Image (cartoon, rainbow, N blue to C red):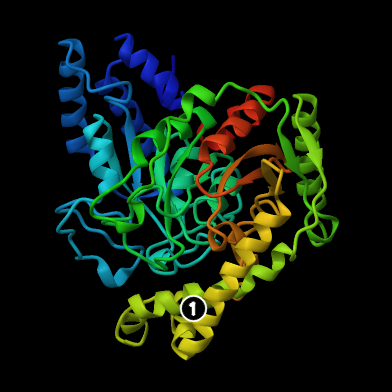
Amino acid sequence: MNSALSPAYVLSREIEAQRLSPVDLVDALLARIATHDPKLHAFVDVYAKEARLAAEAADKAIRSGHALGPLHGIPIAIKDIIDIEGRVTTGGSASRLNHRAAQTATVVRRLISHGMIVLGKTHTVEFACGGWGTNQHLGTPWNPWDAAVPRTPGGSSSGSGVAVAARLAPWAIGTDTGGSVRLPASWCGITGLKTTIGRISTHGILPLSPSLDTPGPMARTVRDVALLYNVLHGPDPLDPLTRGRQATDPLPALEKGVRGLRLARLPPEDRSGVAAEVMDAYDRSLAVLAALGAEIVDVVLPFRLLDFVFMTDIMQAEAYFLHGESAEDPSLKLDEAVRRRLLAGAGLPARDYLATLRRRDEMKQAMETALAGVDALLTPTTATAAIPLEEVDQNDTPSRFTRFGNLLEMCALTLPNGFTADGLPLSLQIACRGYEEALALRIGQAYQQATEWHQRVPAMVE
C-alpha cells in the first residue's frame, strides 16, 4: 500500500490494525512534500522534526495498547490563519512574518487530543480575503492539475486544497467566509465541507468577518470529511457562538443513501453564464442521484444566486473593522487587491451595514420558505474550472454559487463530479439548511459510492 496516496479512513484502519506505522506514514508524506512542494508551494512551514517525534510517540502508544482513538497517528495540515502556540501565524500576510501565536486554536487542540499529527501550516490568501487563491507577496500555490500552466487553486484556503489534492497531506483544515473551503476544493478536485456558523469553534482563528466565518474540513472523500467534522464540532466555552450547538455523529447515517430524499435542481435563470462542461457534469450528477432513488425537483427561489453580491458589504465592513488599520498603513507590504477590499469597508455607513443585516434575515426566511419540503439544493460549486492565473480579474469573484450559504447560515458539501476535456476537475455543491451537515454528508457519500471522480490523482504528483 502506498500510504501517502490513501484516504484518511484507510490510514486509520491500517494504523489501528498495526499494519502501518505512523512513523512510516509521516516519513512518506514528508518525502512527498520535499519532492513536490518546491513547485506546489502549498506549505508556509513544515514541522518535520516535531511531526516525526509525534509519530514516534503515537507508534509506541498504539503498540502498547494506549491508542487515543481511530485517528491517532494520522497527519494533518493547518491553514495559516489558525494559531498554534509559539508558531508563526502569518495570516497570509508579509506584515505578520514575526507574529508568534500566544495560544492554540480550539480546532487544533481537538485534533491533537485525538492523537493527530500537525505536518505544518498551509498558504492562504492574505487575511483570508479572496476567492482566487492568489497571494502577491508570499506566493500563490500551484494547482496540481496542470503541470505547465499556473492556474487558480481557489481561495482563501489555497494551500490546504493543493496539499490534499497533491497527496502531501491526507486532509487539512480550511475556513470559509464566502466559499474559502469550497472554491479550493472545487478547483483542486477534493471534498470540502462548509459548516454552519457556530458548529465549529473559531477561537484562535484570525477573523475576517465574524458573522460569516466558519472552519471546515478538506479531504479526498466524504467519509474522511465526516470523520474530521466529528472531531471538530461541538460547544466551546471560548466561542460563544458554539454554545448549545450540539450535533450527532454523522457516521451512522452516512450509508443510508438518498432514496426518498427530495433534491432541488438549479433554477434555469441561474444556469446562464456557466461553462458548458460545468453544466454537463452537473446534469449528469443529478441523473446519478436520481438513479439512486432521489427525487429531483424544481423550486422557485426568491432571488437569483447572483444577487448575493451585496453580502460583500457585511464582509468588507467587518474586515475593515478588524484589519483596516493595516490596510491604511502604506508602509506595510499588503497585497494590493486585498488592501482595496479592506479599504472598501471604510466608506460603508453604519445604517447601510445594519440594513444589510436586516435584509439578510429577510432572505433567510424567504429561502426557508422556498425550500420547504426539500432536503437539499444542488448547484455547481464554481461556474468554470480553474482558470490561468494571468486571466484572473481581482475585481471579480468566483463565489457565485458559494456566498449564499454563508449569508443564509446554511451548510454545504463540495465534491468532485467530473473533469473537463483538458483534465481539470469540476465540482458539485450540496447545500442544506443550517446544522444539517449530517444530511449533506449522507447525500455526498451516496454520490461518491456511485462515482469515481474523487479517486483520481493529478498526474504531476502520482
Q: Is residue 60 visible?
A: yes
Depth order, front residue of 420/110:
110
Identify the residue at image location x=28%, y=37%: 111
Question: In what quadrant of the picture does the N terminus appear?
Answer: top left
- View extreme (right): residue: 268
Depth order, front residue of 21/230:
230
Identify the residue at image location x=48%, y=48%: 195
Identify the residue at image location x=39%, y=34%: 230
Amino acid type of disc 1? Arg
The secondary structure type at the circle numbered 1 is: helix
Q: Is residue 425 visible?
A: no
Picture mark count: 1
Depth order, front residue of 253/315:
253
Identify the residue at image location x=28%, y=21%: 69
Relative to residue 402, is residue 23 drawn left or right?
A: left
Relative to residue 265, is residue 436 drawn left or right?
A: left
Q: Percent from the top left, x then y, of residue 75?
A: 32, 32
Quarter assignment of residue 260: top right
In the depicted structure, whether residue 385 falls above or below residue 100: above
- Residue that mark 1 sits on: 341
Label 1: how many Cα within 10 Å (few below 14, some 14–19, many 20+): many
Relative to residue 100, is residue 79 drawn left or right?
A: right
Relative to residue 290, is residue 327 drawn left or right?
A: left
In the depicted structure, whether residue 107 falls above or below residue 19: below
Quarter assignment of residue 163: top left
In the depicted structure, whether residue 436 falls above or below residue 100: above
Depth order, front residue of 396/308:
308
Q: Percent from the top left, x then y, of residue 251?
A: 47, 25
Quarter assignment of residue 117: top left
Q: Percent from the top left, x then y, of residue 360?
A: 58, 69
